[in-house]
Every structure is written in C-alpha cells, then in structure tokens.
Amino acid sequence: MDVIEAIRVRKSIRGYKPDPVPKEVLREILDIAARSPSSVNTQPWETTVVTGEVLDNIRRANVEMLASGVVPQPDMPFKPYEGIYRQRQVDLAIQIFQLMGIAREDKEKRAEWMQRGFRFFDAPAAIILSVDRSLDESRPLFDIGAISQTICLAALNYGLGTCIEDQGIMFPEVVRKYAGIPESKRVIASIAIGYPDWGFPANKLESQREPVESITTWCGFD
C-alpha cells in the first residue's frame, strides 16, 4: 500500500475478527517498524507480543481489577485533558456512543464499553511497548510514538487493523505477571492488532482532524 494512502486510511479499529494473526506476519511488521526514527538512534523501544492464553489472562485480570474498584496506577501517569483537548476527547466519545447505540444515561452499556478497552478491544493479539527505567521518563516518548505509528501503517499492508491504546496497560502489574515484563521496564503503550470486523459499528467512525491553517504558523513565506 502506498504510504500516503496508508496515512489517510489508517483508523483506530475497536472491533476484530477472532482469526489469529500469524507470528511470522507480526514479526515482519516489527522488523519493518524497527526502522522508525529515534533520538540519536537510541532505539529505546522493547516490544512484547501477546496472544492466546497469555492475552486472555491479561484481559480477565484487567476486568477483575476494574470491577473491584482498584485505582489504575499506570507506569506513565497522566493528568486529565482540559480545554479544547478535553472537548476533542468528548466529541470522539459522543461519536462512538452514537455508532454503538449507547445512550448517555445507560451506565451499564457505558461500563461494558470501558471494559472493551481493558480487553484490548478483544483483538486476537496485542503489542506492548516498554522502555528501560534507566532512561529519562519523557525523552523516549517521541520514539515510542514513532514506532507505534509505523507499526500501525505497516499493519495495513497485511490487511490488519490496529488501535493504539492505554487502557490495556492501566494495571501494569497485571501485564508484568502474565507477559513476564520485569520491573526494570516501564510499560508505555499498547497496540491492539488483528483483522478488522467491518460490521462492528464503531469501526465506521471517521474521526475529525483540525485543518492545517488552524494548527500551523507560516514564517518567512510571501
């Protein structure tokens, strides 16, 4: 697939077919993604690919933690969005809930939807990205973002869909227990990956983007 086309058509997939993704395909995607740029070529990313029983165990434990009221303690804490950034987040949620037929007052369905995120949207595989704790907390984030985008674009070439998400790693102790990631690594992001179920309502979402003129300052041009 042409790279420009891939950038334009890539979207977050939140519903997947149960078909397993072959290990050799995932290996090829990661091999391609390893060419991603990183600060002074540090290549700080470490990938853990989970599927089958391991992924099912993580899903189950995540949902149990969530249902029991345990407060998530992600390795990369964040503060809530404010202003226009919060509004964009809300607008996205409204679009998804409309597609899924989830009413604002339907707390049960809203809770079920939240659980899907903690289950990696029921994808047949997930890629977990981590970095060594010896590294500065903020500097590797650019690099993780770069390789995440590359993974998602490369996946399209194999007919796969992806969703970069953090809910699946909100309880890093769960991920460490079942995926064997040591405490010396900081779990940064995860990517659900699999064959898209195009009949799933949320996959029809076309999220909005700000026009170039509203986010760009031009200097030195006539």
Image (cartoon, grey):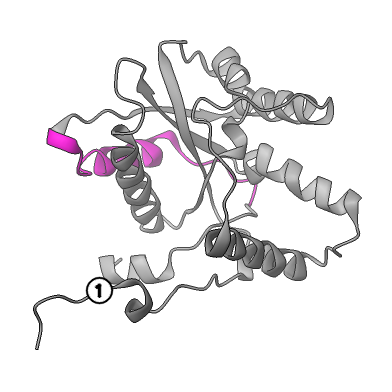
> Can residue 176 be spotted in the picture?
yes
Residue shown at 22% from the left, 31% from the top: 43
Instruction: Say which quadrant the C terminus sits in.
Output: bottom left
Q: Is residue 88 left or right of residue 142?
A: right
Residue with the mark numbered 1: 217
Give the image location of residue 11, x and y in percent: 49, 63
Return the residue nearer the eye: 64 or 121.
64
Hey, which residue is sitting farthest bottom in the picture?
Answer: 222
Residue 156 image point, x, y percent? 40, 58
Dividing the picture into quarters, in which one does residue 125 lie?
top right
Amino acid type for the residue under numbered disc 1 = Thr
Residue 199 visible at all: no
Q: Secondary structure at mark 1?
A: loop
Query: Would residue 90 be found to the left or right of residue 101 on screen?
Result: left
- Residue 193: x and y, percent? 51, 45
Whole-percent x and y of residue 5? Answer: 33, 72
